[in-house]
Amino acid sequence: MASHLHMTAGAVRRTMGAQELMCWAYLLTEKSRPPEPPKPLELSVEDEIAAWPM
């Protein structure tokens, strides 16, 4: 991975295959995406009552 970081865009296009470019695109875009927000917790009425401090 580090060996490609110093390459220019033209050198990358000449030397990398489509599969390698797709892998790089996946790695770079997945890191820049924000994480998914957690799903809301759904409790039954009994669970909600039990969660209240007494």
Image (cartoon, grey):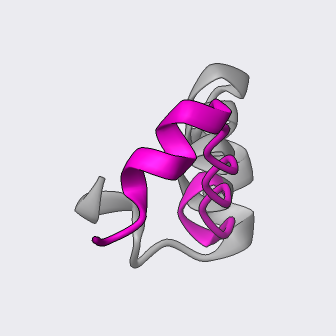
Foreground pick, 11 / 53: 53
Foreground pick, 23 / 39: 39
- Residue at 66% across, 36% down: 45
- Say whether residue 33 is left or right of residue 48: right
- Residue at 28% across, 71% down: 54
- Residue at 69% across, 33% down: 22
Can the viewer see residue 43? no
Q: Magenta: predominant secondary structure element?
A: loop
Residue 3 in picture, x, y percent from top left? 27, 60
42 inside magenta stretch: yes
Image vertical order of residue 7 relative to residue 20, above or below: below
Image vertical order of residue 42 relative to residue 5, above or below: above
Image vertical order of residue 15 relative to residue 1, above or below: above
Query: Residues in magenta?
Result: 30-54
Residue 8 in picture, x, y percent from top left? 61, 76
Count up the numbered dots: 0
Can the viewer see residue 20? yes
Of all residues, the one furthest to the top in this rendering is 19
33 inside magenta stretch: yes
Residue 26 in picture, x, y percent from top left? 64, 42
Foreground pick, 42 / 31: 42
- Residue at 54% across, 33% down: 46
**Based on the displayed image, in which of its 4 quarters is residue 38 positioned?**
bottom right
Foreground pick, 13 / 37: 37
**Based on the displayed image, in which of its 4 quarters is residue 43 positioned?**
top right
